[in-house]
């Protein structure tokens, strides 16, 4: 059966997800869209030649759109209301990161989902579906490098606009590392610290860039993650896990090697959409397939969204204090214990 999707927010990623549901994936179609900018929604429908209705808002889309699932690609502060409306309507929800902008709001989603009695929500932490991270996880779980002791990660963007603020280095950018790195080593964060190196001249006056975030896990692993969002040279994601008996690292993005103009090299990506393009495909295909097979989505849950939000809150606090800040999670409910 084809899953009918409603897309809420037709900006950069909304349009990209519409394209993949319509053209790349099996078993889904976009039948309804909405955006607070109605022209953007109409344009997206026209650009993709979709047979989809444009609705004035998320609630009308849910009530009248005849959808099985919604994809939420609006701005972070708008996510909570759409997720709760989706759960209330009994629809499946694929919500881009962040699930909500505060831990408290994530908990209200967790509570609403548990009250509903069945898992409906998947969060767009697509790196868990990236083949490079999956291979790292296999190597760690097979004890190929012994016990992991340290991780070095970097998240670098060529540049960001003036509206990008210092805390967004955590809530918008590091949030991917926050999710994928504790999943990688199957451990919980206990404390975090943020330090600011010398600032780049390419950052706007109000932005601290780069930043170094240190996360300590319950077993004692120390993760050092660099966020550098005006690095100029490319979109570059790095991850190296240092174990007792060896090191495993994310593979570089595949590209031809060139010899030209007296140079030997490879090109780097500039656009984040290209870096994880396959992972985005696999995560949304898994959302469709898991629901069709088991009646529930199989990927990152609302609880994973909550863990990320608690950790991000601690990192933002650490930005201001310069101290180690604790990460204190509530006990994981039974509802979220099993991987389905
Ligand atoms: P964008 O700014 O290009 O698009 C957001 C769209 O949502 C805009 O068209 C805006 O008018 C619309 N919008 C805002 N509030 C709305 C509301 N209440 N109802 C309906 N529409 C609303 O942003 P972008 O880059 O597409 O990001 C969208 C979401 O996806 C964000 O949450 C972002 O963090 C996330 N994201 C995730 C990525 C990933 O790698 N998983 C990559 C990029 C973005
Ligand atoms: C964006 O919001 C994302 O989520 C991308 O995955 C990330 O790499 C980029 O830095 C963010 O701006």
Image: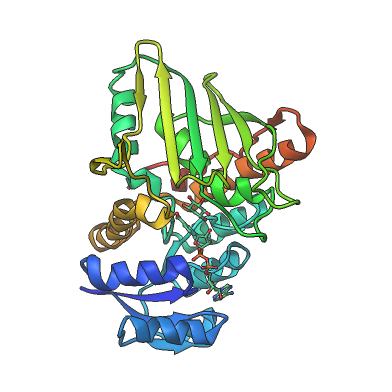
Residue 96 at what x, y percent from top left? Answer: 47, 60
Residue, x 28% and y 54% (percent of image)? 282
Mark yes or no: residue 282 visible.
yes
Above or below, 285 relative to 28:
above
Residue, x 57% and y 80% (percent of image)? 36
Above or below, 123 relative to 246:
below
Residue 52 at what x, y percent from top left? Answer: 35, 86
Residue, x 44% and y 42% (percent of image)? 236
Above or below, 25 relative to 10:
above
Of residues 34 and 59, the one nearer the viewer is: 34
In the picture provided, is 54 more to the left or to the right than 277?
A: right
Q: Residue furthest top?
A: 245
In the picture provided, is 322 more to the left or to the right than 191?
A: right
Residue 314 at what x, y percent from top left? Answer: 68, 39
Q: Quadrant of residue 162?
A: bottom right
Q: Quadrant of residue 121?
A: bottom left
């Amino acid at each position: 059966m084809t899953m009918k999707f409603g897309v809420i927010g037709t900006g950069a990623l909304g349009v990209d997800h519409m394209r993949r549901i319509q053209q790349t994936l099996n078993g889904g179609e976009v039948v309804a869209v909405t955006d607070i900018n109605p022209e953007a929604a109409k344009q997206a429908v026209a650009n993709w030649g979709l047979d989809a209705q444009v609705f004035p808002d998320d609630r009308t889309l849910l009530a009248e759109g005849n959808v099985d699932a919604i994809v939420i690609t609006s701005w972070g502060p708008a996510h909570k209301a759409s997720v709760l409306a989706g759960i209330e309507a009994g629809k499946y929800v694929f919500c881009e990161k962040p699930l909500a902008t505060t831990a408290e709001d994530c908990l209200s989603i967790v509570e609403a989902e548990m009250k509903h009695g069945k898992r409906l929500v998947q969060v767009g932490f697509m790196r868990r579906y990236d083949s490079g991270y999956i291979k790292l996880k296999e190597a760690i779980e097979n004890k190929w490098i012994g016990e992991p002791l340290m991780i070095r990660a970097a998240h670098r963007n060529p540049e960001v606009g003036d509206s990008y603020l210092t805390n967004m280095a955590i809530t918008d950018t590091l949030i991917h590392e926050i999710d994928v790195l504790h999943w990688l080593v199957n451990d919980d964060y206990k404390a975090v610290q943020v330090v600011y190196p010398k600032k780049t001249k390419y950052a706007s006056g109000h932005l601290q860039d780069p930043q170094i975030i240190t996360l300590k896990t319950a077993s004692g692993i120390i993760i050092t993650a660099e966020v550098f969002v005006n690095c100029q040279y490319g979109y570059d994601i790095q991850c190296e896990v240092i174990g007792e008996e060896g090191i495993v690292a994310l593979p570089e993005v595949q590209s031809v090697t060139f010899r030209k103009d007296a140079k030997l090299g490879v090109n780097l990506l500039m656009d984040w959409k290209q870096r994880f393009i396959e992972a985005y495909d696999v995560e949304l295909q898994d959302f469709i397939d898991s629901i069709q097979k088991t009646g529930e989505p199989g990927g990152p849950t609302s609880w994973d969204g909550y863990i990320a939000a608690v950790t991000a809150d601690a990192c933002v606090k650490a930005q201001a204090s310069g101290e180690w800040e604790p990460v204190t999670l509530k006990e994981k409910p039974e509802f979220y214990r099993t991987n389905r």
